[in-house]
Image (tube, grey):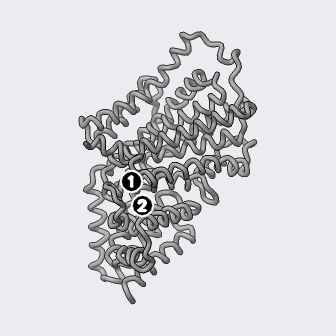
């Protein structure tokens, strides 16, 4: 059997196991291990073993549990809830102000957490009932929360970009910086969309009454302190890192420590919160670690068979596709896979094929893998909110009030999918949107 046939058999076997409902890391790891033993015998265990130890020797991996912990401690201690109260008061008089404030809240939570889960949980349990009670259109605000929470994997510190950096062997700091401008651009599109819709049809987003906001200016100014802590944590953590005073791991430790101190100063660092935060942090961190180990083991065997060269020969030599046509095909495959798989599953499945191929393509600019990481992350955002899988769709259905049905959730996401797709197209046409900031900081 040829190497290409073996590679195809491995890929097909992995997909078949995934269709049976097996855990992603188990399916990928099993196929990789079985292929090693079948091809090289017991001595072949050195291949995945070496891949695993390369991971354990990579210090940025330590940032994963630290950033996850930071996000959960801020969420569980109620600091994010205080932040929403501040935004409610200060944005309430604007047309669509509370929805716009919710988008701002999602961006801030993204900067504190790095995952979309915390933003979705806070938005669905705190912001959504409040907006419904004030007469906001349920489809509009459901889309706002789902679209806004997806920013967590693009705005730094993005845990998904840490995962991509581990597999692609790219500097996480450069990936984070590359995600800043596209992330803010996407958030701005969301805000403009809400403002225009509210201006055209005020019944979708009524303003808050004067009675509800009849609060002395002094009280409003006091509420601003709720926003100081999250911003202070974020700017201290990223500022020290960008200025070169701390490494990536040290920056993550600063963020985790500052979040813990903030919860303690507010008198909310109880044993129950610490236990819940630790349990959730451990669960998510272990999931990511198993996925990375499985992907590295599978990729070592897959690449050793020459699968990447075979794909390159198929796309470029036989089909005579241009490098940009290859990139477009990759993006389309991400969209299709994203309808059935989550972001981490997509990455570990295609990483052995796509990342080496992107490295070989001549796109006419530097930092191709950094740029491709941003494209991948933005495509994951679309995967989060598109059926039939749509992780955020299921989470929203579980957390939303009874008056919001699955049909409402599906209707709400399409304008935000269109805006995300527009951002992806702009970043593809103008790579400097993503690469300008990392190049400027590096310079």
- Residue drawn where x is 42% and y is 29% of the image: 231
Q: Which of these two is toward me, 321 or 351? A: 321
Pointer 1 local density, CA inside 10 Å: few below 14, some 14–19, many at least 20:
many
For the point 45% across and 40% down, the residue is 113
How far apart are labels 1 and 2 at the CA level?
Answer: 23 Å
Foreground mark, 1 or 2?
A: 1
Secondary structure beneath label 2: helix
Position of residue 169 measured from the top left corner of the image (x, y, whole percent): 31, 58
Q: Quadrant of the C terminus?
A: top left
Residue most toward the bottom? 1
In front: 198, or 322? 322
Residue 371: image tag = 1
354, above or below 165, in the image: below
Circles 1 and 2 in contact, beta carbons < 8 Å = no
Relative to 270, say whether 37 is above or below.
Answer: below
User: Which residue in the structure is indicated by mark 2?
Assistant: 291
Q: Who comes first in sequence, dot 1 or dot 2?
A: 2
Q: Count neighbours of disc 2 (C-alpha within 10 A) and say few if under 14, some if 14 to 19, many if 20 or more.
A: many
Q: Is residue 137 left or right of residue 393?
A: right
Position in image of residue 192 (x %, y %): 59, 36
Nearest to the observer: residue 258 or residue 326: 326
**Which residue occupies 36% across, 53% down?**
370
Q: Is residue 64 visible?
A: no
């Amino acid at each position: 059997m040829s190497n290409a046939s073996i590679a195809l058999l491995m890929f097909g076997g992995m997909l078949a196991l995934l269709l049976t409902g097996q855990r992603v890391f188990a399916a990928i790891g099993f196929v990789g291990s079985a292929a090693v033993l079948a091809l090289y015998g017991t001595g072949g265990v050195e291949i995945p073993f070496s891949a695993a130890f390369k991971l354990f020797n990579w210090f940025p991996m330590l940032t994963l549990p630290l950033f996850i912990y930071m996000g959960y401690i801020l969420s569980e201690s109620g600091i994010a809830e205080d932040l929403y109260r501040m935004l409610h008061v200060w944005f309430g008089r604007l047309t669509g102000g509370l929805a716009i404030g919710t988008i701002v809240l999602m961006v801030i939570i993204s900067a504190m957490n790095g995952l979309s889960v915390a933003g979705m949980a806070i938005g669905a349990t705190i912001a959504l009932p409040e907006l419904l009670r004030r007469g906001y259109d349920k489809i509009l605000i459901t889309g706002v929360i789902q679209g806004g929470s997806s920013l967590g994997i693009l705005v730094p510190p993005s845990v998904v970009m840490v995962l991509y950096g581990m597999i692609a062997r790219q500097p996480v700091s450069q990936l984070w910086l590359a995600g800043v401008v596209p992330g803010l651009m996407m958030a701005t599109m969301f805000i403009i969309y809400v403002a225009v819709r509210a201006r055209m049809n005020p019944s979708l987003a009524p303003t808050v009454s004067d009675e509800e906001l009849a609060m002395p200016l002094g009280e409003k100014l006091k509420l601003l302190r709720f926003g100081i802590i999250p911003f202070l944590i974020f700017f201290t953590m990223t500022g020290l890192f960008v200025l070169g005073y701390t490494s990536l791991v040290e920056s993550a430790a600063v963020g985790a420590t500052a979040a813990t101190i903030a919860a303690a100063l507010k008198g909310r660092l109880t044993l129950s919160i610490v236990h819940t935060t630790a349990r959730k942090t451990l669960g998510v961190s272990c999931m990511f670690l198993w996925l990375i180990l499985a992907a590295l083991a599978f990729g070592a065997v897959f690449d050793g068979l020459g699968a990447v060269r075979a794909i390159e020969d198929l796309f470029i030599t036989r089909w005579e596709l241009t490098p940009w046509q290859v990139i477009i095909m990759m993006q389309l495959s991400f969209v299709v896979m994203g309808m059935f798989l989550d972001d981490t599953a997509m990455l570990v499945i295609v990483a052995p094929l796509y990342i080496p191929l992107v490295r070989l393509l001549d796109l006419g600019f530097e930092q191709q893998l950094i740029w491709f990481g941003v494209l991948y992350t933005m495509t994951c955002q679309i995967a989060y909110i598109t059926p039939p899988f749509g992780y955020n769709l299921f989470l929203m259905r579980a957390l939303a009030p009874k008056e919001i049905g699955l049909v409402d959730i599906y209707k709400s996401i399409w304008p935000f999918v269109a805006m995300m797709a527009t951002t992806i197209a702009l970043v593809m046409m103008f790579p400097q949107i993503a690469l300008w900031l990392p190049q400027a900081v590096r310079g």
